[in-house]
Image (cartoon, grey):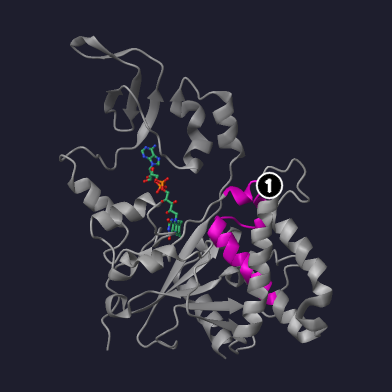
């Protein structure tokens, strides 16, 4: 029997996406010896996965059956071909649709008459799998709906080659390794910044000779003078505070970018099992609600249907380290609704999903 989960649960980043020599995170992690032997293999670094790395998977349908891998592959191939075709609109002054979601749905609607050889049941299944593909894409793009992701610049996103890999010691092992090279006290934690004054002339008390253009004031009253400041606070914080955070305020062009850029909510759900119900080789358990279609409006009743936005579960690897742990992914408003629920309520919804899917 396996140990209970090791306690290593990545709350945020889990994978290095596109681990190959052009990826600075991968290069640092390799240099510090933080990755497993698979990640070091050159053929793994050359795989062109296009942002959708292949994983041994099983797809459960809401009728309680495992769906035919061929049917799932057919729908998924169509979806990836449609996503790839968005590149054609890069730089276009007049893209056919404002968003990726509208474009993909319009293209799916055009394909419907010939889909699955015109066979009604098979066509419905294709549409249900396509609806699931859109939910996965929402997780990847960190958005509620692909209707909120602009079509024209979508193709700017470049996926580096390489089979996604993880840090056996957790993603934080990289930050810890970087920290260990720095003199103690260089990085201060729990030090929220209140304001950044810039374009000024600030002097340390008792030292008139040196003038600093930047003054950083923290919530606890500590002050730091600097020549430069690199700000990496999240966009959500900037949206709320940029006007008083920066003194003087940022140039209008930057303020406008902060206002116009968007982001959504992404969450993980960890479930630990005493015994796995999945096969040892399976790494991804996908769920498809067979009555769904990307051509119909998704349910607006978050309370009743939030869990249907879940894309499925990744099996944490290797089980010898993690125990039998599934990690579910859910994005968007449904994900935000989940944040208002208790652990018991989430667990009961997940149990329902798993019972439905596995019959
Ligand atoms: C569920 C989930 C899964 C993900 N999985 C992956 C993955 O597998 N691979 C991957 O590459 N990426 C993944 N990501 C994305 C990745 O986590 C982010 O892109 C990354 O963390 C962004 O780093 P950042 O430093 O820009 O911002 P953050 O990590 O958000 O860091 C910003 C920091 O600023 C601090 N801060 C805020 N206000 C202040 C203030 N006033 N003063 C001082 N500090 C302040 C915050 O406390 C925070 O520590 C995932 C994200 C989520 C949510």
Q: Give the x, y percent position of residue 91.
A: 68, 42
- Magenta stretch holds residue 142: yes
Q: Residue furthest right?
A: 113
Report the magenta residues as a range: 128-156
- Magenta stretch holds residue 159: no
Quadrant assignment for the N terminus? bottom left
* Res 181 quadrant in image: top left
Q: Main secondary structure of the magenta part?
A: helix
Image point (54%, 86%), residue name: 355
Is 119 situated left or right of 7 in this image? Answer: right
Image point (22%, 52%), residue name: 177
Disc 1, ligand 1: is the CB inside 8 Å? no
Q: Give the x, y percent position of residue 131.
A: 67, 70
Q: Give the x, y percent position of residue 290.
A: 68, 80
Is 218 situated left or right of 286 in this image? Answer: left
Image point (36%, 28%), residue name: 229
Callout 1: few (<14), some (14-19), or many (20+) C-alpha neighbours within 10 Å? many
Give the residue pinned by disc 1: 152
Q: Secondary structure at mark 1?
A: loop
Image point (74%, 84%), residue name: 122
Above or below, 125 relative to 12: below
Above or below, 1 relative to 234: below
Q: Nearer the viewer, residue 156 or 203?
A: 156
């Amino acid at each position: 029997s396996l140990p209970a989960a090791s306690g290593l649960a990545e709350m945020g980043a889990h994978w290095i996406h596109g681990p190959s020599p052009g990826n600075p995170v991968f290069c640092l992690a390799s240099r510090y010896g933080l990755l497993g032997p698979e990640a070091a293999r050159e053929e793994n670094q050359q795989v062109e996965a296009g942002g959708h790395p292949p994983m041994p998977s099983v797809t459960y349908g809401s009728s309680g059956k495992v769906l035919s891998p061929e049917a799932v592959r057919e729908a998924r191939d169509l979806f990836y071909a449609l996503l790839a075709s968005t590149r054609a609109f890069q730089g276009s002054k007049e893209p056919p649709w404002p968003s990726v979601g509208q474009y993909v749905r319009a293209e799916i609607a055009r394909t419907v008459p010939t889909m699955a050889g015109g066979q009604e049941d098979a066509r419905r299944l294709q549409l249900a799998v396509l609806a699931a593909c859109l939910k996965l894409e929402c997780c990847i793009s960190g958005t509620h709906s692909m209707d909120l992701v602009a079509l024209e610049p979508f193709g700017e996103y470049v996926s580096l080659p390489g089979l996604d890999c993880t840090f056996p010691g957790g993603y934080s092992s990289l930050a810890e390794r970087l920290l260990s090279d720095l003199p103690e006290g260089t990085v201060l934690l729990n030090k929220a910044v209140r304001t950044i004054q810039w374009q000024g002339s600030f002097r340390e008390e008792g030292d008139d000779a040196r003038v600093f253009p930047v003054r950083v004031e923290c919530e606890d009253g500590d002050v730091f003078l600097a020549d430069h400041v690199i700000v990496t606070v999240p966009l959500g914080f900037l949206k709320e505070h940029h006007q008083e955070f920066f003194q003087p305020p940022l140039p209008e062009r930057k303020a406008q970018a902060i206002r116009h850029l968007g982001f959504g909510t992404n969450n993980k759900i960890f479930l630990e099992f005493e015994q796995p119900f999945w096969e040892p080789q399976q790494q991804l358990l996908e769920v498809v609600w067979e009555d769904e279609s990307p051509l119909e409006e998704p349910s607006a009743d978050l309370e009743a249907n939030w869990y249907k936005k879940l894309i499925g579960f990744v099996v944490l690897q290797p089980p010898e380290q993690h125990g039998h742990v599934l990690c579910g992914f859910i994005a968007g408003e449904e994900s935000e609704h989940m944040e208002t629920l208790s652990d018991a309520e989430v667990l009961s919804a997940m149990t329902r999903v798993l019972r439905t899917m596995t019959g």
